[in-house]
Image: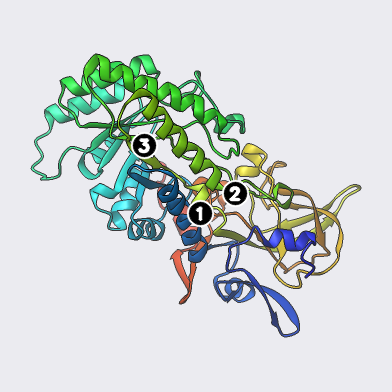
């Protein structure tokens, strides 16, 4: 394959263990030494693959950059909303990460994975009483989003008769600093009119309540948005948060031991986005901004905590589909595959732009642009538009890289779709970490009409 070819560029988006190997006279995509043809034959399609080496490579980059850039304590949380199952939670715990859980459902996944309370951090913009009760019982940290939530937590504490020796979880306040990063409007979260977090003025009231109730308030959290590649807006947000810290210290005598500016650094999904800025520059920018801001205000360095989800897991994931039919209209060649918006909603929801490669004989000459569509009864069920690809035939396999984040976590049973199986690929082979849904599971919750 020519190094500068479009197909070579696409290969750069795949997991770091991806290779092309000769099999029976055909070049075949392999990940972690596993033939994608054989994996599809064994486990069927649609099929999701997660490469452990790519995960650990991404994690090492985040960790080493924090070590090199920030003189104070630091840590990482895996943002479970990107993709969470018991296997992924176990991997995160084994590597010393906290796991961000949104509500009782994800807390249950973390507990099933054997996570101790100190490894569970709970987010949520409108936590139910059940969510809060589970968080108090099983989490090590709760990120408080609003006044109502804090009042409910205080009530839970006052009424609690539990005998558990576990201490009350640490609390972080989620702030709305009034700034947003440049990204899709649906993934901006820090602007003044965002539904997330609380204003800086009201946050002071929440901090005062925590002190009055003797609750363990230890941190501040904010998040400006996801899939951005310019960290500049974080500077203004961080300055506002540090000014808020000074105000808290002056008015109620409180200082945070942790500041978490969230995550959200983007990843490239298409070869046209290469080269893409490394997360190293983002981490260095945050570390230097926080260090300088604290020094200027003469406040101690807090623990700098980051929450990468997509940044760790997106490139590790690959979606594998099989072509069902090829259709030609007046202006388009449609490649209809056996998955789509039911397992990857991002193109329909955000206009996300993906790329793809055939699994076999990647180097074939392109025959013109194709549109990859899914099988669902929506005109918006389009995975990829106008992509240069070789001629494809029914039965061929197509692999879409950078499929590790926000695919399966937003998957649905639309049109009776059954969620795909998920494989974990490591040096020891391929391991099933989520079974494919079966038809009987689609009616598991249903009950007949009364007679």
| Mark 2 or 1: the one toward you | 1
Identify the residue shown where x is 34% and y is 32%: 127
Q: Residue furthest bottom?
A: 24
At label 2, counting other C-alpha atoms closer than 10 Å, the crowd grade (few under 14, some 14-19, many 20 or more) is many
Q: Residue 236 at what x, y percent from top left?
A: 50, 24
Q: Earlier in the sequence, mark 3 or mark 2?
A: 3
| Image-based side of 296 in relation to 138, left or right | right
| Image-based side of 425 in relation to 399, left or right | left
Q: Nearer the viewer, residue 66 or 218?
A: 66
Q: Earlier in the sequence, mark 1 or mark 3?
A: 3
Labelled disc at residue 344: 2
Q: Residue 49 at what x, y percent from top left?
A: 54, 63
At label 1, counting other C-alpha atoms closer than 10 Å, the crowd grade (few under 14, some 14-19, many 20 or more) is many
At label 3, counting other C-alpha atoms closer than 10 Å, the crowd grade (few under 14, some 14-19, many 20 or more) is many
Q: Which residue is mark 3?
A: 123
Element type at mark 1: helix
Q: Earlier in the sequence, mark 2 or mark 1?
A: 1
Contact between labelled residues 3 and 1, with CB atoms less than 8 Å apart: no
Q: CA distance from mark 1 to mark 3?
A: 19 Å
Q: Which residue is mark 1?
A: 313
Identify the residue shown where x is 40% and y is 18%: 199
Contact between labelled residues 1 and 2, with CB atoms less than 8 Å apart: no
Q: Residue 179 at what x, y percent from top left?
A: 52, 23
Q: Nearer the viewer, residue 439 or 406?
A: 406
Q: CA distance from mark 2 to mark 1?
A: 15 Å
């Amino acid at each position: 394959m020519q190094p500068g070819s479009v197909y070579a560029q696409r290969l750069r988006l795949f997991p770091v263990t991806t290779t092309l190997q000769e099999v029976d006279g055909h070049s075949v995509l392999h990940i972690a030494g596993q033939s994608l043809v054989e994996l599809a034959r064994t486990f069927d399609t649609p099929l999701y693959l997660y490469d452990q080496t790519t995960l650990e490579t991404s994690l090492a980059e985040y960790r080493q950059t924090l070590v090199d850039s920030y003189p104070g304590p630091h840590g990482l949380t895996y943002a479970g909303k990107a993709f969470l199952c018991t296997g992924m939670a176990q991997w995160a715990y084994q590597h010393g990460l906290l796991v961000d859980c949104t509500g009782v459902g994800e807390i249950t996944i973390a507990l099933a994975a054997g996570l101790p309370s100190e490894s569970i951090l709970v987010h949520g913009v409108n936590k139910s009483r059940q969510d809060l009760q589970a968080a108090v019982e099983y989490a090590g940290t709760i990120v408080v989003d609003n006044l109502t939530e804090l009042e409910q937590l205080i009530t839970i504490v006052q009424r609690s008769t539990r005998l558990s020796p576990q201490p009350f979880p640490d609390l972080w306040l989620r702030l709305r600093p009034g700034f947003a990063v440049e990204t899709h409007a649906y993934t901006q979260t820090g602007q003044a009119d965002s539904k997330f977090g609380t204003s800086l003025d009201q946050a002071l009231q929440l901090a005062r309540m925590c002190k009055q109730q003797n609750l363990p308030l230890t941190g501040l959290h904010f998040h400006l948005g996801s899939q951005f590649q310019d960290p500049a807006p974080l500077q203004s947000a961080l300055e506002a948060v540090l000014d808020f810290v000074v105000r808290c210290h002056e008015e109620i005598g409180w200082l945070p031991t942790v500041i978490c500016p969230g995550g959200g650094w983007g990843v490239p999904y298409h070869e046209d986005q290469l080269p893409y800025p490394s997360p190293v520059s983002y981490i260095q920018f945050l570390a230097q901004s926080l260090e300088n801001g604290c020094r200027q205000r003469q406040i101690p360095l807090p623990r700098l905590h980051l929450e990468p989800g997509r940044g760790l897991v997106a490139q590790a994931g690959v979606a594998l589909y099989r072509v069902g039919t090829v259709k030609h209209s007046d202006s388009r060649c449609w490649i209809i595959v056996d998955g789509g918006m039911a397992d990857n909603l991002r193109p329909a929801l955000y206009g996300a732009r993906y790329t793809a490669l055939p699994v076999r004989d990647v180097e074939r000459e392109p025959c013109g642009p194709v549109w990859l569509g899914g099988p669902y009864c929506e005109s918006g069920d389009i995975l990829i538009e106008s992509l240069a690809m070789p001629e494809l035939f029914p039965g061929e396999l197509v692999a879409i890289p950078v499929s590790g984040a926000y695919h399966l976590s937003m998957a649905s049973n639309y049109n009776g779709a059954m969620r795909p199986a998920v494989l974990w690929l490591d040096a020891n082979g391929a391991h099933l970490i989520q079974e494919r849904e079966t038809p009987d599971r689609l009616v598991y919750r249903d009950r007949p009409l009364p007679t």
